[in-house]
Structure formats: structure tokens, C-alpha cells
Image: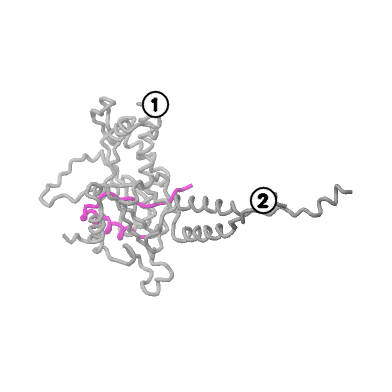
Amino acid sequence: MARKKKEMPELNGAGMSDISFLLLCFFLMTSSMDQSMGIHRVLPPIPPPDQKIENQIKGHNVLQVLVDGQDRLSVNAKVMDLSDLKDAAKEFILNPTNDPSKSTKKDEEIPGVGMYKVSEAVISLQNVRSTSYEAYLRVQDELTKAYNELRDEAAREIFGRKFADLDNAQRDAITKIYRQRISESPPKDTRKNKN
Amino acid sequence: MAKFTGKKGKKLAGFSTASMGDIVFILLFFFMVTTTMRETEVKVRTEVPKASELVKLDRKDLTVYINIGPPIASEQARYGTDTRIQLNDSFKTVDDIRNFIAAFREGLDEKDRPYMTTALKIDKETKMGVVSDVKEELRRCQALKIMYNAIKAE
């Protein structure tokens, strides 16, 4: 009888799970899962009022993309389906046949790569006030896709790797070769600037 | 026979729930790490469009959010169904963006200010007129880095 060990009273852990369930519920209610993802853009700064506006970009270097009030897409005044926009933009920027009606190339010194023929293409994106945001963003998405694919191709050609696998210096070089040049002007029927 | 009768006195081993708390705690930590606190109550419907070329937003603390869309059902009695701009917790106009951006920029560290990004959460049925006005106002506020929020298209 004296041998019998007195057992420690066991701590009841059942309540702990209830407490942590409550905490869990609190976090589920107050937090949101959504990861902010999207398409990044940099707006052009407002030019100083005394700056002279010069039309430096030659007409054949500009790809006119217009989304009208019925969300129809036209490229260089020709109606186009959204699914064709990416290839049209790529072809316009690359201009593999050196078509004089498409963009020209200029030799430019790219650090880490050397002289490279950089396309001078600019994509001008125009919309009206009644264009829907969805149509606008789809077009932006397709144009981004065109640039991303061009960068990927250039990265494979020069460095033999995908753009995503490059290091920072290489990535900068590729970005210099295919700089995203999407110019947007405010809708023509926009309200007048106040200042 | 003794072989069978011997079992009668034994009790079934108790089912220990002590580890359940640990499991729930792991769940809790998972949610705490993967989610972010909801700072503002969203009063407009922002069903963002789908896109494929998405980039993650890297610095959430340097991001200011502008929601644009029609008021949600419970607010429609007071504010109608027209497209509205929500800054923080209330409906504002394009002209209020200037102060809103300035206030946010004031709160940032000096060295972080150039990296400030404006995330535009815009409902897909919004007309571009409003969006252009907001963009023009952002240009005037020198808040040039913007991001159009979208969700991944399958």
C-alpha cells in the first residue's frame, strides 16, 4: 500500500482548444485572404506649363489603339479582335520584315549586352469616357503580355534563360531593350483641367 | 476462461483532447500569417476584372487604396447606384483625393515616399470617365505609381 504512487492531477486540456478556436474565428472574421495583385503602371508627370509641346515621335512609330464607347477595339483605325492585339503589338514592335510602315529601330548601348537594335515603337492607348473599365484593363493586359513575351524571347536569345530567372543586372538590360512605352492621353471628351 | 474475464475490469483508455488545442493553434498561426487585417469597411462593390499578367504588390505599407464602384446594396438607399469613390471609410469626390494622398504621404518615412503606390480597386463595370478623372488627379498629386487591381484569369 505504501508503494502506491500518488498521481499528479491531470491538467484538462479540453478548454484550450475552445479558446484557440475563438481566437481563430476572430482572425477569420477580421482578416481578408485577398492578395493584392494587379497591373503596375507609372503615370506621366504633369509637364510644366512653359514646356513646348513637340511632336517628336514619328507617325510610323506609333501604334494607335482605340477602345470606343461600345468597348470595340480598333488598331490603327482598323477593327481588331482582342485576341489578335498581342500578336499585332509584338509584330509592330519587332517589325521582323523591316516594313517602313511599322516601327524603326535604333542602335543603343545596353550595359552588359552591348549594341542592340532597340525598337522605337510607342503604343498610344486611347479610350472614351464611356469605355468600360473591364475592356480597358483587358487591353492593358494584352499589351503587357506582348511586352512580357518580347522580354522573355530576348532573355532567351541573349542569356539563354527565362526573364524571370535572370539576375537584377540582366533583367535591367532586358527591360532597357523592351521598355514598356504605352502612352495614354485622357479621353478626348474629358472635362477641362481646373488648373 | 480467465483469459476473457480478465478484460472485464479494464476501462477503455480515455481519448485525450490535449493535442487538439495544439492543432487549432497551428491553424490559427497559419491564418495569422497568410491573411491581412481588414482596415476599412468596403462600401462599394469592387468586382475587379480578370487579367493574366499580374504582379504582386510588394510593399503593402506603402500602398494607398482607392475603391471605385457602385455602393453596396445596404448603402444604396442613401447613396444611389451611381459610381462612387471611396477613400478610407466614406464616399468622396475626385477633389478629395488630393488631401487624402497628401495625408498618406505625410505619414510615410521620407525615404519611402517615392515608392508610394496607389492601388486602384475598380469595379469592372465602371466607365472610364471616372477612372480618367482619378488618374488625372493622381498625376496632379505626383502620385504616379499606380496599380490596377485585378484577379488572376484561369
Q: Quadrant of residue B105?
A: bottom left
Numbered marks: total: 2
Q: Residue B129's x, y, as percent?
A: 30, 59
Bounds of the magenta segment: B126-154
Q: Which mark is residue A160?
A: 1
Would you place residue A93 above or below residue A142 in this image? Answer: above
Q: Is residue A76 left or right of residue A28?
A: left
Q: Residue A173's x, y, as percent?
A: 29, 31
Badge 2 is on which residue? A5
Q: Quadrant of residue A96?
A: top left
Q: Earlier in the sequence, mark 1 or mark 2?
A: 2
Using the image as rendered, state which of residue A6 and residue B62 is in the foreground.
Answer: A6
**Badge 1: how crowded within 10 Å, few (<14), some, or many (20+)?**
few
- The quadrant of the image that shows the C terminus of chain A is bottom left
Q: Amino acid at mark 1?
A: Gly
At horizontal 22% and vertical 56% (from top left) the residue drawn is B106
Tell me the subunit letter for badge 1: A
At horizontal 33% and vertical 50% (from top left) the residue drawn is B147
A89 inside magenta stretch: no
- Could you tell me if the residues under marks 1 and 2 are in contact, i.e. CB atoms within 8 Å? no
Q: Secondary structure at mark 2?
A: loop
Using the image as rendered, state which of residue A147 and residue A165 is in the foreground.
Answer: A165
Q: Amino acid at mark 2?
A: Lys
Q: Nearer the viewer, mark 1 or mark 2?
A: 2
Q: Residue A188's x, y, as percent?
A: 25, 56
The Cα–Cα distance between marks 1 and 2, rounded to whole angstroms, is 73 Å
**Badge 2: how crowded within 10 Å, few (<14), some, or many (20+)?**
few
Q: Residue A98's x, y, as percent?
A: 30, 30
At horizontal 20% and vertical 61% (from top left) the residue drawn is A192
Tell me the subunit letter for badge 2: A
